[in-house]
């Protein structure tokens, strides 16, 4: 563990040239709740006019990519469904790659259940048939779901445990929040002593790989922009990819330690656009 050493303002705060692709976190970066954050619309307009690739990466699996594209568009931010990568997208991708044909038990909300069914995965509540237990952000979580996971993992010992995202809580406006997938993973791990083997959200590089799929852009020509150091920024730095932390969400300037010294630091997102 590193000591928390605040940085002094000796590093370059903003990029001095355009990148080819921009990967944005959503909550705390593009909007907070239903409010678009300052500078976002101008930034998006400038990037679109410059012909840059734009992608939106969210750890939140409680909305489908279609719902995110609609939400952004309704806020006046142009977004195509194909530009959205959330943990529904990465979970499907990971399962197709590693466990095609698996019988799954998602502890999850409707959009992930629907996406799994549409992708051809069998969803079962029979612990003797479950291959993969998927821990997720599920506001309908309760004891009966925990029992099914327990039986599949501990009693039948046939299933593996994965999670959509490693977040402890989802931040809300006004400093409040909701328990997120890490709480459900922890409950399952605590009673089964079975460890979660894979996490589909930031800081997993799966998010970047899925977001940039089909594009031939080197990672050093892309920048990841987000408000959380341990997820958004850590993921990018682990990949050797440029990163920018924006102080409109969780992170305050004094939170940035030497571990994150290579990240650009932006008070508002419009500082991404180089000064001409
Ligand atoms: Mg965020």
Image: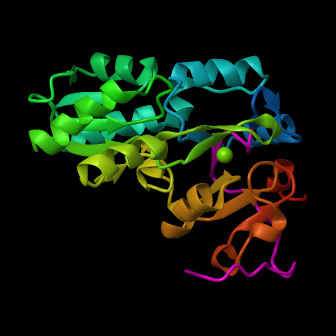
Look at 43% across and 17% down and name the residue there: 110
Residues shaded magenta: 1-30
Q: Is residue 27 magenta?
A: yes
Viewer-closest of 127 and 50? 127
Look at 74% across and 52% down and name the residue there: 250
Q: Residue 85: x and y, percent?
A: 50, 36
* Residue 67 vertical position relative to residue 155 in the rendered view, above or below: above
Q: Residue 47: x and y, percent?
A: 75, 42
Indicate the quadrant where residue 155 lies.
Answer: top left
Image quadrant occupied by the N terminus: bottom right
Residue 205 visible in image: yes
Residue 215 visible in image: no
> What is the basis of the colouring in this image?
rainbow
Viewer-closest of 45 and 170? 170
Viewer-closest of 98 and 53? 98
* Residue 253 vertical position relative to residue 132 in the rendered view, above or below: below
Look at 82% across and 70% down and name the residue there: 254
Q: Residue 270: x and y, percent?
A: 85, 49
Please state if 109 lies on the left or on the right of 169 as rendered: left
Look at 44% across and 22% down and name the residue there: 109
Please state if 73 lies on the left or on the right of 167 as rendered: right
Q: Is residue 57 magenta?
A: no
Indicate the quadrant where residue 46 lies.
Answer: top right
Indicate the quadrant where residue 56 lies.
Answer: top right
* Residue 2 vertical position relative to residue 19 in the rendered view, above or below: below
Image quadrant occupied by the C terminus: bottom right
Q: Residue 90: x and y, percent?
A: 39, 39
Q: Main secondary structure of the magenta part?
A: loop
**How many marks overall?**
0
């Amino acid at each position: 563990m590193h000591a928390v050493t605040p940085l002094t303002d000796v590093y370059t705060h903003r990029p001095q040239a355009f990148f080819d692709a921009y990967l944005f976190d959503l909550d705390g970066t593009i909007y907070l709740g239903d409010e678009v954050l300052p500078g976002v619309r101008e930034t998006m307009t400038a990037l679109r006019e410059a012909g840059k690739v734009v992608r939106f990466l969210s750890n939140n699996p409680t909305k489908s990519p279609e719902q995110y594209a609609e939400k952004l568009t309704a806020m006046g931010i142009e977004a195509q469904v194909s530009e959205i990568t959330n943990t529904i997208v990465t979970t499907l991708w990971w399962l197709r790659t590693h466990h095609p044909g698996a019988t799954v038990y998602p502890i999850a909300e409707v959009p992930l259940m629907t996406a799994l069914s549409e992708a051809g995965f069998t969803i079962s509540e029979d612990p003797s048939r479950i291959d993969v237990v998927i821990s997720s952000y599920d506001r309908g979580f309760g004891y009966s779901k925990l029992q099914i996971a327990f039986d599949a993992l501990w009693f039948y010992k046939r299933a593996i445990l994965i999670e959509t995202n490693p977040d402890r809580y989802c931040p809300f406006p006004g400093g409040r929040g909701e328990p997120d997938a890490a709480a459900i993973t922890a409950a399952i791990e605590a009673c089964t002593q079975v460890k979660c083997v894979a996490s589909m959200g930031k800081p997993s590089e799966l998010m970047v790989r899925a977001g940039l799929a089909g594009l031939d852009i080197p990672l050093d020509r892309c920048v990841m922009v987000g408000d959380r150091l341990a997820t958004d920024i850590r993921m990018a730095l682990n990949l050797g990819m440029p990163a920018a932390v924006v102080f409109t969400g969780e992170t305050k300037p004094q939170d940035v330690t030497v571990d994150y010294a290579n990240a650009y630091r932006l008070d508002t997102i419009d500082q991404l656009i180089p000064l001409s």
